[in-house]
Image (tube, rainbow, N blue to C red):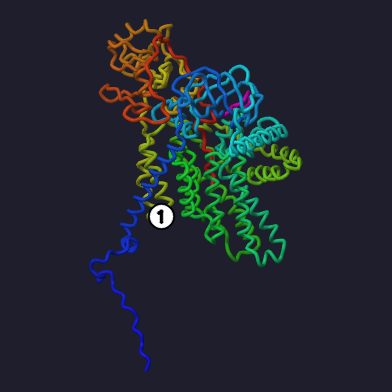
Amino acid sequence: MPSRTRPPVRRPASRRRPGRPAAPGRWLGTRPAALALALLLAAAFLGFAAAAWRVSHVAGPVLARTTIGPLAGRVESLEEREEGARLVVRVARFGALRPEETPRRVRVSFRKAPPVKPGDAIEASARLLPPPEAARPGGYDFARDAWFRGIGAVGSLTGKIVVRPPAEEPDLPARLAALVDAARNALTRRIAEATGGQAGAVAAALVTGKRGLIAPATSETLRAAGIYHVVSISGLHMVLAAGVVFWLIRAGLALVPHLALFWPIKKIAAAVAMLGVTAYCIFSGWDVAAERSLVMTLIMLGAILVDRPALSMRNLALAALVALAREPEALLGPSFQMSFGAVAGLIACARLVGGALFRQPGAGRIGRLYGAVLAAVIGTLATTLVAQVATAPFATYHFQTVQPFGLLGNALTLPLVSLAVMPAAVLGILAYPFALDLPIWWLMGQAVRGMLAISGWIEGFGGATLVVPAFGRAALGLLAAALLLATLPVSGLRWLALLPGACGLALAAAPERHDLYVDRQGGGAALRGADGRLITLGRPSGFVLEQWLKADGDGRKPADLGGGTCDRLGCVGHLADGRAVALVRDRRAFAEDCARAAVIVTGLAAPPGCAAALVIDRAYLARHGATALRVAAGGSLAVHHARDPARSAPWWPAARPPPQTEKAPRPETAEPAQEETPGPPDDPDP
């Protein structure tokens, strides 16, 4: 009789042999809380490691002071503007600076159309200064963004630009980047000339991402209608580009019966679409917004290859991880926050946005047609509404503006953009190599003119753009937590979002406004007058004044501000409690102003015996940057700074002692251009 083999006996975990340790994976698998903690710690350590690697990878010198001298380098990119152009130059040498002090890249402007192209080695005289820091405490820090882009100085070129033979041949990536930028400029000029006017400038920006030809007035019109995001190469462009390639490849393969029956044509189309959208991102300049949109699009197309749902929170999380692993600093920027916030909201409301609630299975022909039309209309409105609600906390925090008619603007213009403008752009790109594109660009321009006409009509409404006071980081953190709680859970836990949302709205509705703003050079200030609105002391630049007005919730233009009492030696104003604030331009004013003023503001070095309660002079500003103060309860002065003297940042140039012969500082004219300041969202599209 054959013997039966007894099955092995499995010992439970509690009866495991003593002295034999359990496998870590098995131990964590039976303890969900421990597994979650281990994953959290691993993510934190990896995040710090990615941040440290990124800082070491982009580290470069920052110009310490305004310097004029000969500049030699290679043009990496060039963007034509209405007047002149803006160049990014890879620096070979500048003035008498040592190599370890010379910025790697500089961004310079030129008043005329320069006789150069990307890749040229040039020599010219340049006036460079450190990238401007935040104009107010908590404001947009252009210096930080420039540093992470490898730009260590900004300024302008003067005199004649001379093109020289390069000292050494650039490497292959640099040559390819120059060729791509030159091709973008050529296509931008072709589209703008074929269409004409500002419609041509907007049409060119929609295709190539070059926005230099768009006039400031046109940008304000698009912002008032809430559709400025369409001119930035971002989610809408990437999805349409990938969708067109995907549809063309799949439709072409489906025409062949053998391929349609036996080949995975959907996956083939997804793979080709991934290559096509990557090529378009490279051509469009590989901007930060475009890069994040590309990552999200690639992951969604990759989900098709592995038979997973293309639109899900898991894929959105993977896209966020990839984007942050490459650029951890993007987490602090409005582009990342608004892009992922909008997509999270749209995924959470997918049934409403997709119109599934309005389609009735088994309905007749009229019922199906009615449901399809209703689904399209409601879906368009719901998409815009959900995206605006999800991005509102970040847009208001960074830009201090609200477009109440943005829902109407997007509802009227996005169908035109999706059905006419962007398909024409795709057809134009396909016809461009065969020189058959000019009629297509003209037709695209007519659709863009319609878009601009709708935007101008909306801009004419009263209150199309509302300026709201800046609120703090605590309110933004609570509102962001509310968005996460409202979108991530798939159960009744979503109702927990009401608590942080209500607290965040309460904090945002009661911001602390400052009573005095001082620019980072001490050449100008803004003081709250007797009527509760800001007035100017000295001559702060228009860019800085605009940032102060937005932070105060004041919709006036910088030219509309009144000024304090001024003479050749300085200016005098008064706080709400009557205490004097003196802006000193000349050293001869110190004796009188230090004796009578509570606050001294100057770009000079104040005398040691100055009796004012608060002295904001050159040395003070070199340590603290732009300064703002508020009259607190009891008459004390609550002072806030853009810089923290207790810590350092690599994008802050080292503080330097004042020169022996002092003069009152002039307002800097090389402020960041309008499109480099925080404006309306660049990429809130899914």
| Residue 331 sits in quarter | top left
Q: Which residue is mark 1?
A: 489
Compared to residue 685, the image places residue 95 above or below, namely above
Residue 59 percent location from the top left of the image: 45, 33
Q: Residue drawn 32% across and 24% down?
A: 639
Closest to the observer, 414 or 669: 669
Q: Residues within 10 Å of mark 1 (few under 14, many from 20)?
A: few
Q: Residue drawn 56% across and 28% down?
A: 89
Q: Looking at numbered disc 1 in the image, what kind of residue is underneath it?
A: Pro
Does the magenta-highlighted stretch encompass residue 83? Answer: yes
**Does any portion of residue 182 appear in the rendered image?**
yes
Left or right: where 300 falls relative to 601: right
| Residue 398 sits in quarter | top left
Residue 108 percent location from the top left of the image: 56, 25
Badge 1 element: loop
Which region of the structure is painted magenta?
Answer: 81-88
Closest to the observer, 287 or 220: 287
**Does any portion of residue 560 appear in the rendered image?**
no
